[in-house]
Image (spheres, grey):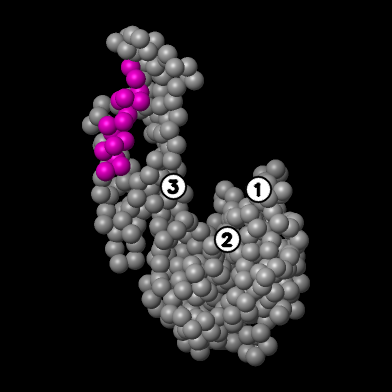
Amino acid sequence: MQALYLTEQLVSRRSVTPEDGGCQPLLRQRLEPLGFECETIVSGPENFRVTNLWAKRASSKPGAPALVFAGHTDVVPTGPLEQWTSDPFVPAHRDGKLYGRGTADMKTSIAAFVVAVEEFLAAHPDPALSISLLITSDEEGPSVDGTVVVCEQLKARGEKLDYCIVGEPSSVTRLGDMIKNGRRGSLSGKLTVRGVQGHIAYPQLAKNPIHLAMPALAELAGIEWDRGNDFFPPTSFQCSNIHSGTGATNVIPGSLVVDFNFRYSTESTPDALKQRVHAVLDQHGLDYQLDWTLGGLPFLTRPAELVGAMTKAIEEIAGVTPELSTTGGTSDGRFISRICPQVVEFGPVNAMIHKIDEHIEVAQIEPLKDIYRRTLELLDRA
């Protein structure tokens, strides 16, 4: 039960973004005796230092393919401690479940990575596969000093990556029922519509930005941006926040601010989406400012060696054929996909991620580790 023991050790380390809490030094202690060269890459301002671990064990075989396990040691804040049944940073067992912040997202996956590698190398000390781990403490936060920084350095060095398994909790109702083989892109906009403030009893002397913006927002909400494809659902436009008004009931506001987001498929591009939004706003004659933030590009791994090996491993260990899916939010896979052609996400059931009393079924842990190890074995033979 080494994977369970290591999970408990990781959960007991308080590592709310951007803190690592000593998780990565613990991983180094396990990896260096296996022949991994470990490098710590620190990034970010003084008040938000991010720690990244790059650990690599190169194969002795020329032209060996390279696989990287990717994950994050940082966790989201606990929320109200009084609502937790037990201390979120003290691993607790109840009714066959392991409780603690990070059990599901994603310290169990990291522990399973490490133990799977230990077992694989014990049986195959000279594999035809280079193995690496990329671990960050900035996935749940801004994600600007974590995996993206490591990937930029790897690209500058000319590092070659062939396969990547991100340990995000991808399973839905049972371990192995879903692999994420891609993610939608994320494009956010902050729209400021300018009007003229005035007394609500004299609307002819004012210009209400709420009234002006509503027809344009309704049109944007009704547009079919694309129809998706075999792997992606259609692109979605959603407003998340609307702010306006002075707080008084007798004042027409002078401006309206709308936050919105596109989760977009590979059938659309950020530039095309921007152009269509501006065209609608201009058509409605709005006086506006629109600031864009590109949160992530979409990525897609079509069925090939990595999907095939992981699917076979899941079928053998968990007894289920996984569904391929690109649903959900973004992950660090969006950065790794820029330097690695095959990226998938696979991990435990995601029902309790970010919640009070986060937990994982203990019975999932060994099979998860075995799936990672079996995937290594299958890729080593490919």
Secondary structure under tag 1 reads loop
> In percent of the image, x 76 and y 61: which residue is there?
90
- Dot placed on the residue nearer the N-terminal end, 3 or 1: 1
Q: Answer left or right for 275 relative to 10.
A: left
Residue range highlighted in magenta: 207-222
Q: Nearer the viewer, residue 309 or 173?
A: 173
**Residue 168 drawn in magenta:** no
The answer to whether residue 300 is above or below residue 88 is below
How far apart are labels 2 and 1 at the CA level? 14 Å
Q: Which mark is residue 226?
A: none
Q: Position of residue 77 (x, y in %)?
A: 65, 50
Magenta span: predominant SS is: helix
> In percent of the image, x 49 and y 20: which residue is there?
247
Amino acid at dot 1: Gly
How far apart are labels 2 and 3 at the CA level? 28 Å
Q: For residue 108, which quarter of the picture?
A: bottom right
> In percent of the image, x 64 and y 64: which residue is there?
359
Q: Which mark is residue 79?
A: 1
Asked whether the viewer can see residue 159, the reply is: no
Marks 2/1 in contact by CB < 8 Å: the verdict is: no
Crowding near pointer 1: few (<14 within 10 Å), some, many (20+)? few
Amino acid at dot 3: Leu
Q: Nearer the viewer, residue 101 or 106?
A: 101
Eye-nearest disc, 3 or 1: 1
Crowding near pointer 2: few (<14 within 10 Å), some, many (20+)? some
The answer to whether residue 360 is above or below residue 372 is above
User: Which residue lies under the disc numbered 3?
Assistant: 294
User: Which residue lies under the disc numbered 2?
Assistant: 352
Q: Answer left or right for 21 relative to 169.
A: right
